[in-house]
Amino acid sequence: MTAAPERHPDSAGPGTPAAIRGKRPKQGEPVIDRALSLLAVFTDRRRALTLSEMARYADIPAPTALRLIARLVAWGALERLDDGRYVVGVRLWEVASLSPRGHGVREIALPYLEDLFEVTRHHVLLAVRDGNEAVLIERLSSKEATEVAYRVGGRAPLRSTAVGLVLLAGADTAFQDAVIRQPADVEAGVDAMPEGQLRRTLSDVRRTGVAMIRRSAPSRTVSVASPIFDAQGAVAAALSIVVPDGATPPNVLAPAVQATARAVSRNLGFKAEVSAGVRHLAQA
Amino acid sequence: MTAAPERHPDSAGPGTPAAIRGKRPKQGEPVIDRALSLLAVFTDRRRALTLSEMARYADIPAPTALRLIARLVAWGALERLDDGRYVVGVRLWEVASLSPRGHGVREIALPYLEDLFEVTRHHVLLAVRDGNEAVLIERLSSKEATEVAYRVGGRAPLRSTAVGLVLLAGADTAFQDAVIRQPADVEAGVDAMPEGQLRRTLSDVRRTGVAMIRRSAPSRTVSVASPIFDAQGAVAAALSIVVPDGATPPNVLAPAVQATARAVSRNLGFKAEVSAGVRHLAQA
DNA sequence: CTAGGAGTTTCATTGGGTGGAACACTAGGG
DNA sequence: CCCTAGTGTTCCACCCAATGAAACTCCTAG
């Protein structure tokens, strides 16, 4: 399902040993890729960029970048600020909001997330898997809630987050193996799991329908996550709640999270009995 | 504003220097525009399309469409389903989430919208202006709330919605005039305002900081909206609440909506006193 | 079996894309 | 003041990436 396990091809150019040619590794990249790489230069930290910044980051000559950007602006993928800088446009956001795995699940899940949020008053997260990372689709947070590591639209590792574990446990075994074989991503505040324990954990997650992760940075928190299933019975997303460590015990949270996840699954067309067999509440 | 300003590819030669050619070059549209038009074929109703559907809607020959789509898929702008159909990809959504006027305002406003939502339990909307329409950035709705016309990512007219009026009132006068001169968009359930009344209404909205619209379809509702200001004192977005007609009277809702909008404005860096002068609560 | 539609590959042709060069402009720095 | 360095922009001759008709492979319906 994940179309491109490969990283971005646009960065392949500079590494090419074209030096032997004696000729400069000139162009030769499809225009679309260049245009898309111009979109990809925007990050959480860099939301407004000048022409030359964009050209530099995307490694495209200024005149060419200008021409491409002009088209993107005309369409609305980018917008130009008064000071001349460019930002991602509303039009692009509008199209992107049609992404089934983006706003799609969100749209259906939101009311249920709301409920869970109101009852608990803690962070409620919704994530889907893209490649070997989890992408945060939604996050509800009260203004007073504890600090949390990830923002909506951001990415989180699969092995060291509750939603990540749920998504990983729901993936096909071939993919799981590939991820497990990779060196564990070192992340602050979470203990890296050795392979054996990770496999056992994933198995538990599949059986119980709940994943739990305790972390100490950026703040001491406990996350409890559950899978959301689509009509085909595949894990479409993961729902989690993040609470300060020491507050409500995880085994009290689990039923609430599970129940909410199930409610969302049902609205996605999932029939619990069909492919899931008997599922129990997590043991106390 | 609306998708593509340029229509025909034959508009290349204004001076018609190609007349001597005698040949009719069919294609000639920039590749980027074609790629973008392939993204634009997705709508609320059509979220998963086959290759030939996309090619047909975008008016691009199948082989060419296939090639372009392949690039888009490789990057993640599109994803391919198991059945071969294409949908908008998470990667695109991810980049789009960096849109300042899209998820940007939303990110800041959400906790406050939450509060308002919890207190009232009615629809809470957040919208920005794009061209001569309002784009819905966020909508919080309880599962039991009344039917509402617009979805997140969708567009709404400026003249006949509460958020629209707020955004219109906050635009520069030249733009306002242009909109007012346009024939009123006929919309079910809302009475079209004659020019004079519209001008008066906009003036009132600017003065009081509140807009109100009553509509009878798809259900009988009352909307109350207030402007959200950015650091420069410009209207960056509009916040509104939609309640069943006959429930809580609008003048009770107004202060809550205004207070919430102000809270968001403050978090966007707006200093109330600087450019707004004294603002009063709407009279009771 | 035929017909038709969707998806894909091939390939000769050509016009859109390219980026160096040159321009205008602004901001420092001496 | 001139001078340098940076940005954004226009110009234009070269040429390779983009193109789409045609052909081919799977399907499914009749």
Image (spheres, coloured by chain):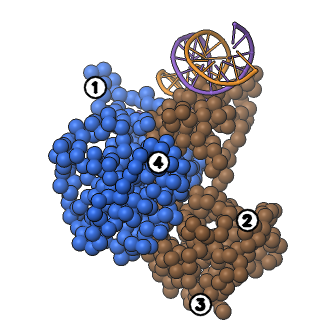
Chain colours: A blue, B brown, C purple, D orange
Please state which amino acid type lies under the numbered disc 4. Glu
* Residue B232 horizontal/vertical position (percent): 50, 73
Q: In the displayed image of the protein, which residue is found farthest to the bottom?
A: B284
Q: Earlier in the sequence, mark 1 or mark 4?
A: 1
Image mark for residue A17: 1
Q: Residue B16's x, y, as percent?
A: 74, 32
- The residue where tag 2 is placed is B218
Number of callouts: 4
Secondary element under disc 3, as helix, strand or loop, is loop
Q: Of the residues tagged 2 and 1, which is closer to the observer?
A: 2
Kind of residue indicated by mark 1 = Pro
- Residue plotted at (73% across, 21% down): B23
Of the 4 image quadrants, the one containing the C terminus of chain B is bottom right
Crowd band around label 1 with a 10 angstrom C-alpha radius: few (<14), some (14–19), many (20+): few
Earlier residue among tags 3 and 2: 2
Q: Which residue is mark 4?
A: A273
Which chain's residue wears label 3?
Answer: B
Task: Rate crowding at label 2 as few (under 14), some (14 to 19) or many (20 or more) other CA atoms within 10 Å.
Answer: few
Residue occupying the point 18% across, 43% down: A196
Cα–Cα span, label 1 and label 4:
56 Å
Q: Is the same chain shared between marks 2 and 1? A: no
Query: Which image quarter: residue B32?
Result: top right
Residue that badge 3 annotates: B280
Chain letter of disc 4 in the image: A
Which tag is nearer the camera, tag 3 or tag 1? 3
Q: Which quarter of the figure is the N terminus of chain B placed in?
A: bottom right
Q: Amino acid at mark 2?
A: Pro
Q: Position of residue A79 (x, y in %)?
A: 53, 55
In 3D space, how far apart are the residues under numbered discs 3 and 2 (Cα atoms)? 33 Å
Task: Classify mark 2: helix, strand or loop.
Answer: loop
Q: Residue placed at 56% from the left, 28% from the top?
A: B66
Tell me the quarter of the picture where residue A195 sits: top left
